[in-house]
Image: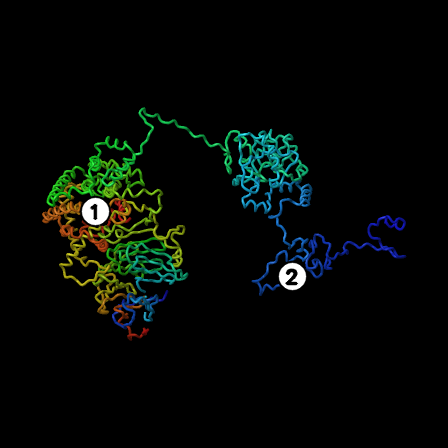
Amino acid sequence: MAFPRPRPARPELPRKHVRTIECGQGAVRAVRFNVDGNYCLTCGSDKTLKLTHPMCLLQKVNCVQFNEEATIIVSGSIDSTVRCWDCRSRRPDPVQVLDEAKDGISSLKLSASEILTGSVDGRVRRYDLRAGQLYSDYVGSPITSVCFSKDGQCVLAASLDSTLRLLDKETGEMLGEYTGHRSTSYRLDCVLSEQDTHVGSASEDGNVYFWDLVEGSLALTLPVGRGVVQSIAFHPTLPCLLAATEGCVQLWREDTLPAPGGVLSTPE
Amino acid sequence: MAADSSDGEEEDLVNYGTALQPLQEGERIKKPVPLQEQTVKDAKGRYQRFHGAFTGGFSAGYFNTVGTKEGWTPSAFISSRQKRADRTVLGPEDFMDEEDLSEFGIAPKDITTTDDFASKAKDRIKEKARQIAGVVAAIPGTSALDDLIGPSKITIGVELLRKMGWKEGQGVGPRVKRKPRRQKPDPEVKIYGCALPPGLSEGSEDEEDEYQPENVTFAPKDVMPVDLTPKENVHGLGYKGLDPSQALFGASGREHLNLFAADSEDPSNLIGDVRNNRRRKLGITGQAFGVGALEEEDDDIYATETLSKYDTVLKDEEPGDGLYGWTAPKEYRSKKRSETEVKYIGKILDGFSLASKPSAPNKIYLPPDLPRNYRPVHYFRPVIAAGNENYHLQKVLEESTGKLGSDATQQSRHALNASQRREQLGETVLKGPAPSVLEYLSEKDRERLKEVKQASEQQMKAKMLPQQPRNSRFQPASPDDASHKWQMLLGGQLANAGSSDFKPFARDPEKQRRYESFVKSLKQGEKVDTLERYLDPNMTEWERGREQEEFFRAAMFYKSSNSALASRFTRAKYEDDADKVEVPRDQENDIDDKESAVKMKMFGKLTRDKFEWHPEKLLCKRFNVPDPYPESSIVGLPKVKRDKYSVFNFLTLSEPTTSVTQDTNERKQENNSVSKPKKPSRWDISDKEKEKKDSISEFISLARSKADLLQKPPVPTTEESGTKAAETLPSEADNENKDQEQEEESRPSMDLFKAIFVSSSDEKSSSEEESDEEQQPSTSVVDSETTGQAGLPGSSSSNIQDSVAVKAEPGVSSLPASKQEQNNAEEFGPKLPPSFSSGSTWQQETVVPASSPGPGRKEKHKKSREKHKTKRDHKHKKEKVLN
């Protein structure tokens, strides 16, 4: 008899604004957590990266990602290529260039053996290294953001038709569709919550929207700011959200958090 | 003793040796020192041992300490514990004494000539020693044989001279042709080893000449084309297997037997003194070769070869075989040469030798019988396409070819075109591009003409449609329409297309031939069914359709090949390999189908493309993933080579126009609706998506009901279901026309022009204008049709949109391509089915999947099945679309 498993915590959503970090690097184009969620990396329009302690990014390169062992950096850029850089050998040229996309790469994610890219040509491409296959799913409208679900079975793709689609990774079938936010011209992020219970997306109306993953119903609207919420990132283990808007990053936690700012300290 | 005895008396006696000490009285005679106690000292006073085999050979150990109490001490002891790394490797020198390294020691340190550079004149002592050793050895004669077989050594001087161009048999200086000296070697004096450089033997040359045939010349002696054939057998080096016939009988009558060559006719060969008359089979048997079954006498095979049989004196003559120690292969031996020498009369060039094998005689074919009226004079008449532009050229050529040219033109009087007639009449050439007849007409007349044309076209179509039920619905576009359209479109331009010396398919002569006959018949205005017979009958229907389309296009683009430009270019003499481009084997395409699938929210198989993808090995390693294709060297998607400038690489399907119309449509709507302050970014997408969806669902439901109607009377699901279908689906006519428009108006990409740049640009532009002009009235006609039928159930909102788009067309047709691209992702109108995108196939196909009343999922299955059916077609289409 093993220990009884702890009762799964009720799925929580970050409903409370904890702090705003002034990044001072122009418009924050992307904000990301690192693997354990202790740092956040922001990439600003002034081509700088800032690693800040609360929880963590790059420039005309649209998106970057480490692989799990941080041995490869994969970057997707506006020139429609995905480049894999070797961190170990420090070669100046990429290990491999994935130039299958017909238009700029807007988003990319890595899993243990997969590279998931979303391109403005309206396709979600998944390079499976283990199987040696490239799966290309046509969504139609330019993809702004893609992400894997935590269980690795699904792919969430946000596109410029103001729709988030949850696609089955293996077959490409659509499992869910989430609408309600506005995404027509900016590259906005979509996230899955830490327990895969909810789907979140930034919006151009200054809110962050959360939908129930299964039902597809709108669960929460977070008023983040007046401008476009450009980038959001969900903490890998906690109900904790980073949202970048207009040059600053906001940290949102769950309601039950005892003291605001108790866990996190202001980095700068 | 003897000296002692005679001592004193005779002084002239000579003393030998040293006298012993006179014995003292009473002294006993000393005992001789026993052997083991005799010592010898070296130059430095050290004791040298007389050594036996077990005491270490020469100066054994450290000061002969081997075997003594002190034992043997190495030069230095190094504890390997600390200095394991720099442990010195001891060579033999470390165990030698200084004397050994001195001049007369066993390893002299002085600079001496090594074997490589030693003179080949061997020192006699060594030679002698070896001879003796050879006699004494277990197998007598071995060493001598070794010597014989071993490669000859050439002194460094000779080698240097050779490097400078000097060759043996040649004096130093410019080369002189000389006759070969086929000297008979002295049978008594045998030569082995190396001969001296042959300059010494020149004196003998002259006397030998008289033995040679007068009219035969030879390559100079020095050129030794030693044929170094690679060794392919498992025999020993230089050994040639026993050829029984030659070994037993073939060799008889020869002077000598060769040890290694089956037929040894060479004089003074290796074992030169083995006489034929003794008939010993030494040549093959040799030493310890054993007895062959075929050999008759076996008494003598183990006879010892002593060196006395060989010559030990180097004669000052070259061996005469010109081989200088090479055991050259048989081919070079002079047997063949002697034959060919007799046969071949004439000089042999330096550096060449006669072929060992005569080449197979050429088969001679008798010339064909000449016709009676054949005149053996040929006038070159270049093929010039008749045309306005190269009138000058033609004239010049006619002048150059003389009268015959004009003869020819007179003969083909009926084939004259206007320009030729003009030339004959002596009229001046009109300036500027060739005017179209239409340009002389007034605006009104032109329009009227076109209307008449349109009407006749419509009539014709109406007539032909019911006649030809298509058995294949996968044909890209109805060829009837196509051909008519093309014929109309090309019109006069076609007249020149075939006659040009410009070959669009020159790479594929078969295709070019088909193309030419095709165009010729097209010019004569034949119908498509007859046109089809020029196409390759082995092809599938789809391919034929495709090729026909290609021919049409090519005819249009190559029409003006006889232009002034054409004469300025010549065909490339060498094929450049650069006209192949690497194209990914699999392409993502069929945007149409995917688009429609997305519209219907049928994600899954329809929207998914799956490709083989080869990750970089390092990438796999970094991801801790085994390489899925360990043996392949490909990275990325597998690529295939394609023709860079295939016409089909640049033919686009009718998409751009769709987006153009869509664009205008959208613009209109934007203008009407509340215009939002939206930045024109590439992320833009129309926010009309939702409205469109509504219209689509509406359309689908309509289509379904229509399909139900259609299913009751069994209408064959063909591409063209006759005029009736065309009437019931009024949008079809619309689509057709639209399609037609698209094909005509979509400008090919710049690359295409590059590919076939020879065509003149001005003519084309004028033709395009014409086609545009022709087109406008037709659309207006159709517009009126569709709007007239707007009340019918088939006309959905999308149809109305269509017509709107068509109306808006002329104004926007020149939209920049970038705009089109931007809107490429969008879809317009009822472009539903995944598999059929072009032409009139749309409408019918939307009906088919919709006819199954099942909801979403079932529909999808059906779809996918359908997709399977048409998969092959898709493949082709893929190539077509996205090359």
Chain of the residue under label 2: B
Check disc 2 and report the residue beneath it.
B75
Residue B492 picture quarter: top left
Q: How is the image coloured?
A: rainbow
Q: Quadrant of residue B410?
A: top left
**Which residue is depicted at the point 53% across and 34% down?**
B218
Circle 1 Cα neighbour tier, 10 Å, few/some/many (<14 / 14–19 / ≥20)? few
Same subunit: marks 2 and 1: yes
In the image, residue B172 sits, relative to residue A193, either above or below, namely above
Whether residue B653 can be seen here? yes
Q: Nearer the viewer, mark 2 or mark 1?
A: 1
Q: CA distance from mark 2 to mark 1?
A: 98 Å
Q: Which chain is mark 1 on?
A: B
Residue B553 position in % (x across, y down): 24, 43
The three-letter amino acid code for the residue at tag 2 is Ser
Of the two numbered discs 2 and 1 on the same chain, state the one appearing first in sequence: 2
Pick the residue in front: B301 or A10.
Answer: B301
The image shows residue B493 at horizontal and vertical percentages of 21, 41
Q: Residue at x 81, y 54 (%)?
A: B32
Q: Residue under circle 1?
A: B765
Residue A243 visible: no
- Say whether residue B62 is left or right of residue B655: right
The image shows residue B757 at horizontal and vertical percentages of: 27, 46
Sort mark 2 into few (<14), some (14-19) or many (20+) by Cα contacts within 10 Å. Answer: few
Query: What's the residue type where badge 1 is placed?
Result: Ser
